[in-house]
Image (cartoon, rainbow, N blue to C red):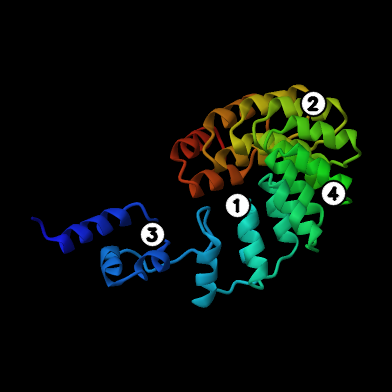
């Protein structure tokens, strides 16, 4: 018959392999044997994870957890309504960041609870919902008096959420040139096209953003439709090592300056730097 103590140690050791390195408090504090199974792993504990239970949160508080509003913000981003209720009962404060993170994650139940219990919000709530592509959350926020600004449209285009952008514009949300720039940065040509064809302004930042993101199709669309550019288009392409974009820009008359070489060098893009120098960039 085997040694039962050794068998138990083996089971604990095996169990520890399924526990993340940032859960020391909840594992190693069970007993000396469990702490021994932790061995040389970090003695770190992240209080808020997708698997945190209300009882673990209470234990963390007993062990000195503080953190102000950051705890409720982290919980809201995970969509854990049960944990948010527990946090509030334990005295944790919240602020506008709680609503923002709930909206960004599409957690309408959390957002509703927060608002029903006096949590503040601002334009970031709508921008967060738009960034996450959560049209239902955005619509609810607007129906319940949440403000918005140009960042709602910008956040929607950055992530390629055309339906959200269309809804926002149909309901009077403002936009600006950064809306097009973020669509270009993300390589969302369909979104960029719709925004431009529906009157969204654009400027040199659009071409820079497309080049910086390495999205040649977005840059080609912008230039074919007379979007302006300047030296930052080339330096943006060089910054992230997009040689194909840089070559196309130069072949199509884009100006450049020393920032192209500087950015290529700083980014460690030797092929871009060599090409730029060989083609007269100083």
Please state which of the two labelled residues, at mark 4 or mark 3, is closer to the viewer: 3
Where residue 21 is drawn, which disc sits there? 3
CA distance for labels 2 and 1 = 33 Å
**Closest to the observer: 154 or 212?**
154
Q: In this orientation, does residue 49 appear? A: yes
CA distance for labels 1 and 3 = 19 Å
**Closest to the observer: 59 or 210?**
59
Say left or right for 15 vs 118: left
Quarter of the image with the N terminus is: bottom left
Find residue 39 and report its image quarter.
bottom left
**Residue 85 percent coordinates (x, y):** 66, 62
Where residue 194 is drawn, which disc sits there? 2
Find residue 196 and report its image quarter.
top right
Q: Earlier in the sequence, mark 4 or mark 3?
A: 3
CA distance for labels 1 and 4 = 23 Å
CA distance for labels 4 and 2 = 21 Å
Quarter of the image with the C terminus is: top right
Please state which of the two labelled residues, at mark 4 or mark 2, is closer to the viewer: 4
**Residue 150 percent coordinates (x, y):** 83, 45
Q: Earlier in the sequence, mark 4 or mark 2?
A: 4
**Closest to the observer: 89 or 76?**
89
| Residue marked by disc 1 | 78
**Closest to the observer: 49 or 235?**
49
Q: Earlier in the sequence, mark 1 or mark 3?
A: 3
Where residue 148 is drawn, which disc sits there? 4
Q: Residue at x 76, y 36 (%)?
A: 180
CA distance for labels 4 and 3 = 40 Å
Contact flag, marks 3 and 2 (Cβ < 8 Å): no
Q: Residue at x 50, y 50 (%)?
A: 266
């Amino acid at each position: 018959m085997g040694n039962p103590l050794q068998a138990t140690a083996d089971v604990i050791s095996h169990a520890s392999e399924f526990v993340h390195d940032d859960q020391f408090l909840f594992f190693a504090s069970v007993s000396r044997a469990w702490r021994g199974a932790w061995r040389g792993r970090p003695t770190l504990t992240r209080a808020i994870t997708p698997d945190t239970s209300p009882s673990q949160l209470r234990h963390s508080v007993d062990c000195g957890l503080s953190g102000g509003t950051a705890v409720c913000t982290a919980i809201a981003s995970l969509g854990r309504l049960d944990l948010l209720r527990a946090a509030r009962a334990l005295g944790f404060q919240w602020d506008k960041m709680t609503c923002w993170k709930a909206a960004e994650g599409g957690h309408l139940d959390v957002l509703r609870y927060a608002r029903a219990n006096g949590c503040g919000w601002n334009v970031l709530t709508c921008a967060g919902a738009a960034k996450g592509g959560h049209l239902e959350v955005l619509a609810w926020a607007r129906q319940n008096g949440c403000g918005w600004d140009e960042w709602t449209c910008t956040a929607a285009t950055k992530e390629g959420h055309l339906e959200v952008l269309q809804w926002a514009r149909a309901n009077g949300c403002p936009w600006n040139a950064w809306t097009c720039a973020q669509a270009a940065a993300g390589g969302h040509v369909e979104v960029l096209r719709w925004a431009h064809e529906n009157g969204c302004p654009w400027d040199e930042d659009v071409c820079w953003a497309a080049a910086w993101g390495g999205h040649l199709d977005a840059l080609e669309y912008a230039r074919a439709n007379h979007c302006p550019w300047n030296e930052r288009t080339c330096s943006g392409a060089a910054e992230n090592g997009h040689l194909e974009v840089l070559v196309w820009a130069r072949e199509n008359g884009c100006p450049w300056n020393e920032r192209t070489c500087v950015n290529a060098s700083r980014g460690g893009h030797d092929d871009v730097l060599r090409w730029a120098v060989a083609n007269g960039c100083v």
